[in-house]
Amino acid sequence: MHTSKVLVHNRDRSEIESEENYLPLNVLRLSKRFGGIHALNEVTFNIEEKSIISLIGPNGAGKTTFINVVTGTYPPEAGMIYFQGQNITGLPAHKIASLGIGRTFQLQELFLSLTVLENAMVGCHTRGRAGMFAAGLRIHPAKADEKRLREEAMENLKMIGLEQRASDSISSLPLGERKLVGMARALGMRPKLLMLDEPVAGLAAHEIENLVRLIHSLIDRGLTLFIVEHNMPFVMSISERVIVLDEGFKIAEGPPDDVRANEKVIKAYLGE
Ligand code: ATP
């Protein structure tokens, strides 16, 4: 088990195990270093079910690193991550994805040679045995499975409003629409917690409005959303709670209005 590499504090464990209702995500004193850079410094917070929580902070604050560590791209140096009461610290990315944490990427990692629908199907494939690699190579599962996956991917494309573009090549889509396909792909894995890395960057105003509607419809379907984003009007209008990182440290956490008025936050952004 990978957790042996991670410092485990007994107090952390009892803090979590005493929770009566397991929250989707509990993060305790999470740290990650890259050489001399402390990308995350003992970051602690919880994410409640069906909530919209945003993580903000100046460039290099550690936001993407946080998503990468929670989703298993990198193991943490220290700290604990619990998902619905289960210790997922240091588990490999495919295992964490199969437990129900989905993500999108800042620079979309879509297959440019595939169509919009085929890209959306990659998420559904990944949930099954074939995996993303096989999906990228167009190694198809059995016919019945294929039909089911296609229908499900089509449903997800409808949800993001791109069903009309299903047979278009992904490379013909503008960046904003590619980002939405990235969301459809993540939804194909039927996540319970969806982590969005800068979903708004590159989107036109009407696309942002669609994204807001989509996020609310995902909450209605029972998902929990965690958003890393620089667009402050978007963050402040959509989030129930905002967490602020600066140089790897959590410097503030609270409702949008409190965070906006927080002196440490103002200083961190002015410093930028
Ligand atoms: P931005 O808003 O600019 O995307 P961020 O808050 O997402 O920034 P991260 O990308 O998490 O910040 O980076 C945090 C720090 O860790 C930065 O100093 C970055 O250079 C460093 N870092 C991140 N990933 C790596 C890596 N794979 N190797 C070395 N250093 C890294």
Image (spheres, helix red, strand yellow):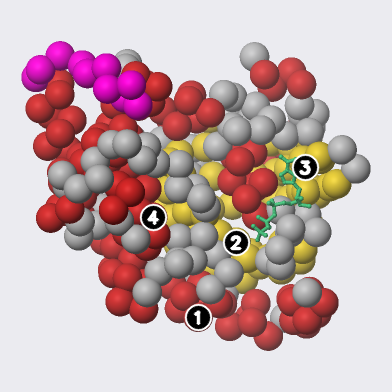
Residue density around tag 2, few if under 14, some if 14–19, many if 20 or more, within 10 Å: many
How far separated are the C-alphas under marks 2 and 4?
A: 19 Å
- The residue drawn where x is 50% and y is 30% is 96
Q: Amino acid at mark 2?
A: Leu
Count of marks placed on residues: 4
Residue density around tag 3, few if under 14, some if 14–19, many if 20 or more, within 10 Å: many
How far separated are the C-alphas under marks 2 and 1?
A: 14 Å
- The residue drawn where x is 80% and y is 28% is 7
Image spot of residue 213 (x, y percent)? 28, 68
Q: Earlier in the sequence, mark 1 or mark 3?
A: 3
Q: Earlier in the sequence, mark 1 or mark 4?
A: 4
Decide: is 128 above or below 264. Answer: above
Query: Mark 3 sits on what residue?
Result: 31
Magenta residues, start to end: 135-144
Decide: is 30 above or below 246. Answer: above
Q: Is residue 214 left or right of residue 176?
A: left
Q: Earlier in the sequence, mark 3 or mark 4?
A: 3
Q: Amino acid at mark 4?
A: Lys
Query: Mark 4 sits on what residue?
Result: 179
Report if residue 141 lies within the magenta region: yes
How far separated are the C-alphas under marks 1 and 3?
A: 29 Å
Q: Is residue 239 left or right of residue 11?
A: left
Q: Of circles 2 and 1, which is in front? A: 1
Q: Of circles 3 and 4, which is in front? A: 4
Query: Mark 1 sits on what residue?
Result: 233
Residue density around tag 1, few if under 14, some if 14–19, many if 20 or more, within 10 Å: few
Image spot of residue 137 (x, y percent)? 33, 21
- The residue drawn where x is 78% and y is 48% is 39
Q: Amino acid at mark 1?
A: Pro
Query: Mark 2 sits on what residue?
Result: 55
Helix, strand or loop status at disc 1: helix
Ligand 1 within 8 Å of the CB at mark 2? no
